[in-house]
Image: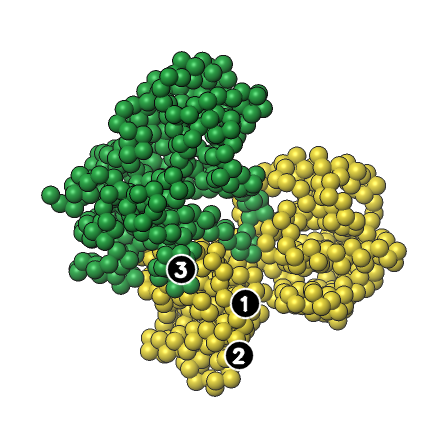
Amino acid sequence: MNAIEELFSLPEYSIDNSKKRKLLLMELNELTRFHYSNCQPYKNILNNLRVTTENAFDNIEDVPYLPVRLFKTQKIQSIPDSEVLKVLTSSGTTNQQVSHIALNRETSLLQVKALASIITSYIGNKRLPMIIIDTDATIKNKSSMSARGAGLVGLSNFGRNHFFALDENMDLKVDEFINYIDKNKNEPMLIFGFTFMVWQYLYKKLKDSGIKANLSSTILIHSGGWKKLLDQAVSNDKFKSELFEQLGIKKIYNFYGMVEQVGSIFMECEEGYLHTPNFAEVLIRDYITWKTLPTGETGIIQTLSILAKSYPGHSLLTEDLGTIVGIDNCKCGRKGTYFTVNGRVPKAELRGCSDTHAETVLNSVR
Amino acid sequence: MNITVYLPYYNADIELEKVLTNEFLFQKPLPTFNELSLEFLSGLSNKILSSKKLKSFPELVALAYWLRKSNMVSIINSFKKEVPENEIIVPRGIAFHVAPSNVDSIFLYSWALSLLIGNTNIVRVTQNANEQIDSLLFVIREMFMDGKWNSLALRNLVITYPREETINRFLSLHSDVRVLWGGDETINSFHILPAKPTTKDISFADKFSYTVINASIFNNSNEEVKSDLAKQFYNDAYWFDQMACASPRFVLFVGEVSDCEKSSKHFWHQLESELVRRIKADPINIAMEKLVYLYESISISEKASPSGLPEQFKPTVLHVDKNEIVKFRESCGGGFFFECFLENIEELIPLVSRKDQTLAYFGFSREELSDFVLKVNGTGIDRVVPVGQALNFSPSWDGYSLLNELSKRVHIAS
């Protein structure tokens, strides 16, 4: 059994971190060599930084990373266009460039498998009636998919009788929603949506309409960034307590993930920490030395994942800030590194003859 | 449609129609080179230099020196010399200035020249004015409270409003000259708006600038000259976070390779000392920008060689081959430089493009530079200045003689 098979064969969140790192490193070394030989921009970067792939890296910290923004400015893939199965694009506002992630069949399958391994460890193997807090228009185009669409499609595999709760104007279909929860009241349901949309279009609408429910066995999974909610002074705790108050949902899990590493998501546990799954790891880097920081110190999040076979996305430096809380010893019982996300690196506001009108607003969802 | 007015009074939310009244739009411009405007600008210069706060911004100090009466008079006089006796200079009418979002003070230069010409001015500043601009506008507002400047207060508006085509359109239809500070996108968005048939546009597009150093002359200079050059270069490069059009992005060492290597090493070392001396550390966002930009740059070159990852108190330098110079036409700012060695300055000629603005030099003679400019023959390069003067505003900017552009000439035949 090779490393990747072993990582997948073991139960999710069950591997001691030192063992996991060894297995990951074997695979990451392999991926680094493969992408070096098959992706010219990646090869240029490593050559120009005088990083050699001749010898395997001894530590996971030594595996070179790419700043995640590179996927927005250039076409970076390690497969010929003829092998591209689908292209994922990131969320971006009109003026922002979007990421371009080329997937082949292998990567795509690994992503599905990884996501299944993570999600089923939270919700069980049975498909649940599923409410999606979005409009079905988001997933109409299957060959080129936005991050939001990819997220919905990925998660929708874990549900059945899908109900898209919003119309095209992002208004909650209130009557249908009530009917749906009424019809399925005897079993657990799965609700999925992007954090901001769950808050804005589901919770607020229900609160304003005075609609309450007791969905105590239902699981809510949400993702997509906290910026807009923090602007409204909504913390994760408040999010949870308000949704419990309104809908009686106790199991609410946020996850941290990105279109550049689909499948490799970091789910929140009952203690409120984000957990690294079997096939991924996070490191925190210092912006002054670019070296890794010890547990407890806040820096820039680097994510490593062994799923990226079609593009060099196995080691990425994000523009998010985070802190590793601990390793293998979370009270929730899950093994591996667990961490928190502490917002984004503030956008550089360099002075200069820049565009008068390039005053864009970061939008976390659309 | 509501706008924010900064000058002559402050009002955060007022209807456009109440500000741009017929009285405002159809009032007579002031006479060209009127004494009042000259006095006002020199008064502003004094205010800046006597304000502890404003004085703390070096670019505002530079502005204040530029606004001194003696400098204004010498600019006016040298312009007057170009004007034949049978031509009279008069204002164009209303000048609409669209200021750049982040080069805080640069629009004040074109505004000041327009004021001297006698034009009535409408200035659109960025929505997120920073501290420098806020304090500066505050000082001007205070001055305008003195009745002495009344005829200027009536003719000069500084406003801001969100990206709003209808307002841009309205202002364009009423302006006789539009002064458009870039980026390219903004300029193009104005070019498609109708204006008066006689409206003239002065467009300051996105530009790119270089520093060129004669390696052997640098190597033969004494330590004092070298460290002074670093100080001067610091001003060119770091004042506007290296984001002004005239800020150097490329540093070219010219001479034998061994001379270039030696001077490069020494030059960057001197700049490092300057950064340490000024405690010029990078906040996380700038460090991140530089890192991302470094990776982007080295991904498109097979043989670029970085000085290392971005570090505190160090410029980030990426050495590139001269054949690859044309690949690198953007910059992230914040102290990120491309470096290249040339055998002679003529090697730069075929690489120059329309976007190139300032060539700041060290160790070249007037003849060499004139020869270079003649050979480039207008395909690029608008200014050639000694290192340290890249950001010094001159009435000749981006190929425009601004006093000329902002005024009209009436020919009297006899």
Is disc 2 placed on a helix, strand or loop?
helix
Q: Which residue occupies 36% across, 23% down?
A: A188
- The chain letter of the green chain reads A
- The reply to whether label 2 and label 1 mark residues of one chain is yes
The picture quadrant where one finds residue A97 is top left
Q: Is residue A66 visible?
A: no
Residue type marked 2: Asp
- Above or below residue A294? Residue B24 is above
- Please give the residue where the numbered disc 1 appears in the rendered image: B236
Where residue A162 appears, x then y in whole percent? 36, 20
Q: Is residue A128 left or right of residue B73?
A: left
The colour applied to the residues of chain B in this rendering is: yellow
Sooner in the amino-acid sequence: mark 2 or mark 1 = 2
Where residue B394 appears, x then y in whole percent? 63, 64
- Please give the residue where the numbered disc 3 appears in the rendered image: A286
Residue type marked 1: Asp
